Image: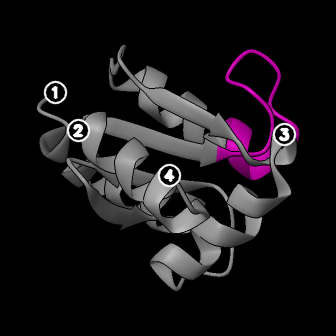
Amino acid sequence: MDTQERIRSQVTSNPVVLYMKGTPDAPMCGFSAAAVQMLEAIGVEEVATVNVLDDPEIRQGIKDFSSWPTIPQLYVKGEFVGGADIMREMYQSGELAKLLGK
């Protein structure tokens, strides 16, 4: 399975996927930490996370997959939602909670 197929499988087989630097317990950048905090703040418990620092192919592949240059990246029900800035805007407006059924 090539990298794009692996990513497609990850985003379609999990309702919520966050590609991030590090892990939810030990984020390795402020943007990834903020993304995790926003999801936790609205009560999202089931999040599949992918640490892009563990796999250089995924780190570049996710940028190609979404045509989005930065990480973290959030996917909900197979659809790309956005990075940390878009998540923050959606969080503040209540859209993120609504999208995630919270």
Q: Looking at the image, tell me whether mark 1 or mark 2 is earlier in sequence order.
A: 2
Task: Check if residue 17 falls in the magenta segment.
Answer: no
Among all residues in the image, which is located at the extreme bottom? 67
Question: Do the numbered discs 3 and 2 sit on residues whose CB atoms are within 8 Å?
Answer: no
What amino acid is labelled 4 in the image?
A: Arg
Q: Residue at x 45, y 67 (%)?
A: 86
Q: Nearer the viewer, mark 3 or mark 2?
A: 3
Q: Looking at the image, tell me whether mark 1 or mark 4 is earlier in sequence order.
A: 4
Residue bearing the label numbered 2: 97
Q: Is residue 54 visible?
A: yes
Question: Do the numbered discs 1 and 2 sit on residues whose CB atoms are within 8 Å?
Answer: yes
Q: Quadrant of residue 79?
A: bottom left
Q: Looking at the image, tell me whether mark 3 or mark 1 is earlier in sequence order.
A: 3
Could you tell me residue 10's position as x and y percent?
42, 43
Q: Residue at x 67, y 81 (%)?
A: 69
Question: Do the numbered discs 3 and 1 sit on residues whose CB atoms are within 8 Å?
Answer: no
Residue bearing the label numbered 4: 6
Q: Give 64 or 42, whichever is nearer the viewer.
A: 64
Task: Check if residue 21 falls in the magenta segment.
Answer: yes
Residue 54 circle label? 3
Instruction: Classify residue 29 as left or right of residue 40.
Output: right
> In whole angstroms, how far apart are the C-alphas of marks 1 and 4?
28 Å
What amino acid is labelled 3 in the image?
A: Asp
Q: Is residue 92 visible?
A: no
Residue bearing the label numbered 1: 102
* Magenta residues, start to end: 20-33
Crowd around label 4: few <14 · some 14–19 · many ≥20 (10 Å): few
Question: Do the numbered discs 4 and 2 sit on residues whose CB atoms are within 8 Å?
Answer: no
Count of numbered marks: 4
Crowd around label 1: few <14 · some 14–19 · many ≥20 (10 Å): few
> In whole angstroms, how far apart are the C-alphas of marks 3 and 2?
29 Å
